[in-house]
Image (cartoon, rainbow, N blue to C red):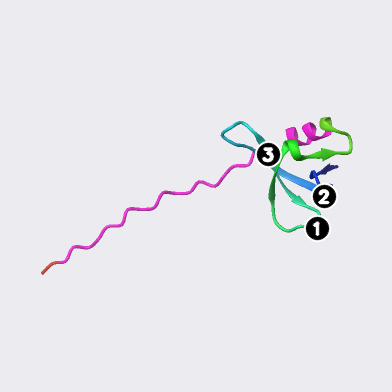
Amino acid sequence: MIYSRFGTKLTPLSKRQDAGGHISIQATAEGGEGVRDYAIADLTADNGLGEINDAVDKLAWHVAASIAPPREQHRRRRTT
């Protein structure tokens, strides 16, 4: 079982890596709403670091949705 540093049970969903190389997981917390990011260093587990590493290794990478750049607006020219 994986827990937050405060002892809340977590259900890991995915993992991601920031530009600095730090890995975090996205998880839901027991009794909480929504998905939050948790730094690997802030996690605890019943069986220690090995259990955390095994759980993180099994997670799929989080893929951010691609956001299309705004379309250029064309203004209609007045004809007079």
Measure the alpha-carbon separation of dots 2 and 3.
16 Å
* First in residue order: circle 3 vs circle 1: 3
Residue that label 3 marks: 24
Q: Are marks 2 and 3 in contact (CB under 8 Å)?
A: no
N-terminal-most mark, 2 or 3: 2
The image quarter in which residue 15 lies = top right
- Horizontal relation, residue 73 to residue 35: left or right: left
At x 74%, y 36%, the residue is: 41
Earlier sequence position, callout 2 versus callout 1 = 2
Which SS does the magenta portion mostly show? loop
Q: Nearer the viewer, residue 14 or 43?
A: 43
> Few, some or many C-alpha atoms within 10 Å of disc 3 (few <14, some 14-19, many ≥20)?
many
Quarter location, residue 80: bottom left
Q: Position of residue 50 (x, y in %)?
A: 83, 30
Marks 3 and 1 sit apart, C-alpha to C-alpha, by 21 Å
Q: How many marks?
A: 3
Q: Is residue 34 left or right of residue 7?
A: left
Q: Residue at the spot x=78%, y=40% of the render? A: 43
Q: Which residues are magenta?
A: 51-78
**Placement of the N terminus among the 4 image quadrants:** top right
Position of residue 10 in the picture relative to residue 18 (left or right): right
Q: What's the residue at 79%, 32% (across, down)?
A: 54
Instruction: Rate crowding at label 2 as few (under 14), some (14 to 19) or many (20 or more) other CA atoms within 10 Å.
Output: some
Instruction: State the SS at label 1.
Output: loop
Q: To which residue does mark 1 refer?
A: 31
Q: Nearer the viewer, residue 76 or 51?
A: 51
Asked if residue 21 lies in the magenta stretch, the reply is: no
What residue type is disc 2 on?
Answer: Thr
